[in-house]
Amino acid sequence: MDRTLNQRSGFSSALLGRANSVAWFWIWVGAIGLILMVHLAFLVAWPDHFIHEDSAAYLIQTESILRGQYLEDTMKRPYGLAAFFALLSKLFGPHILVLVIAQHLMSVCTALFVAAIARFAGAPRFFALLAFCLAALHGRIIHYDNTIGAETTSNFLVSLAAFIAAGAALRKWPPLPCAAAVGLTLGALLACRSAAIGQAAVILLWLVVVLDAGFLRRLGVLALAGVLASAVYLAPAAINFAIGKRPVGNETLAVMAFVVGYSGDFEHGVHLDRKAQARGFVEQMRAADTPRGWPDVDVYQWPFGAMHRLAKPGDGDADLERVVRDIFIETLTTPSTLYRHLTKHFLREMYFVLFDANSVARRAPSPQGYEFFVQRDRYPFFGSPTGFKPGQLVHEYYQPWWPLSRLLPTADQIQLTLNRLFARGYAPSSDLVALCCGLKVSTEYDDRPGAILWLSSATLGLALLLLIGVPASHAGLVRRSSGRLVAGGTLMILLALVSVAVPTFLIYGLNRYAYYAIPFLAGSSAMLGSVLLDWLRAKTGGSKA
């Protein structure tokens, strides 16, 4: 009798487990479908505003590769993104819609990788789903997915490398093949965006620290990943050297100019004669600074004016770059100026970006505001401007096969659904917008703090919880949390913070820089829920998930 009861109990448990898996499969299908529809709603709402102020460099580079004019190009951006766009153009045709749709799909994949990392860390399915939705539905994410730039590809490669590293450290995947995959991915990342060096360093160091292996194997993993990343990153430079393409410079001078203007010592140190030429202007602009920064992006860029005032008659670009580099190095190696940069500029700009604390960091320009760039930077090679009107994309491309046309919704019905989704906080509005159940939300285009305020607050809460809870658990004061949860949460926190730290340290807190942190802020928020649930279950005597 007992044996029969046990068999029935085992059969019931297996049946319930199977039903649970099937239910979660359809929940994920529904969530992914909803998110794809929201991204499509954004694409359809502005089908001809895919160009912003930085898009020109990447499209010009891509066109030069496709036309065989690579040697004649004079842009100053890394060639990784242009090579990727050229590959997409070869596969699907050189059209701007191809590039933008690829960015939307990569963004959804980024959110899936973040959710997978949360599961690897032991988070329940619900919190993994929460991480996915928070990472993929944020208005700032979708806004920049809809414009040509390095943001989407950068986040996709970061999340892919973190996913592979988490698999090796938390799921015991073979370490050496994972190290090779991480290295290749990080190399591609750096070839697309050199400012991602901070995220690459975090992933490598986290993998080495968390990996369950001996010291020599950890060292081998780090060496293999580092060598492959360097090889991929340096490949474009090696190709340029081999074919005789001369380097045309990069954005180093512009980046150094910001640090020099904001925090350089214009009273002492090197190049005092040149500093004297710019001192009055620098003092005037620094005096106009307020605790909430400058009022707009144009004023924030005043260090360019200071840089040009350092020049003397007859100076070439190389002379000015040498002077700015000397003052830049002096600024970072002098304790007083470095302290000023960290406290007066860096920490404040970090706060601005993560908590929507000033108008420059908070407000995204409406895609309609990109009309200037759309008309100025025309790319007939990529069919831009496309000439499409809102809603026209669905009617032009949605043509299901006849047997399915009776079962699937019509183009008008799909467009109506997209319009309703788009009205839930994504369309520009100067007031709060109804989301559902009486809840009103801020859009990305008003002057209120958005959802990133809550994501950053949750991330800060998780960081404090780990900083206090882990030592307390080792002291026996509280129950020790799962090591996987601590490791996964630490990775999310570090990636979120360093994603913002590098650009704000070098430049300032621009709205677009928050894009790089949002997926990992979402992951941290979900991990906070997992840690709290883990501790609550332990306190109430519940079983582990």
Image (cartoon, grey):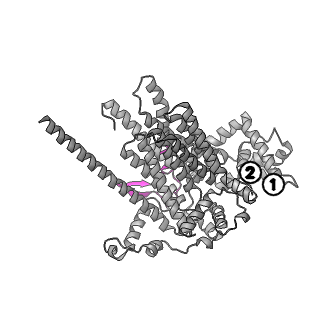
82 lies above or below 341: below
Q: Which residue is disc 1 drawn over?
A: 317
Q: Dot 1, crowdedness within 10 Å: few (<14), some or many (≥20)?
A: few
User: Going by the image, does 129 lie left or right of 54?
Assistant: left
Q: In this view, which residue lies farthest toward the right?
A: 314
Find the magenta span and give its range. Answer: 429-456
Q: How far across and down, in percent of the image, does residue 11 sit?
A: 20, 44
Q: Number of callouts in the render?
A: 2
Q: Nearer the viewer, residue 77 or 130?
A: 77
Q: Which residue is disc 2 drawn over?
A: 253
Of pointers 2 and 1, the one earlier in the residue sequence: 2
The reply to whether residue 454 is in sight is no
Residue 448 belongs to magenta span: yes
Q: Dot 2, crowdedness within 10 Å: few (<14), some or many (≥20)?
A: many
CB of mark 2 within 8 Å of CB of mark 1?
A: yes
Q: How far across and down, in percent of the image, does residue 122 sit?
A: 40, 40
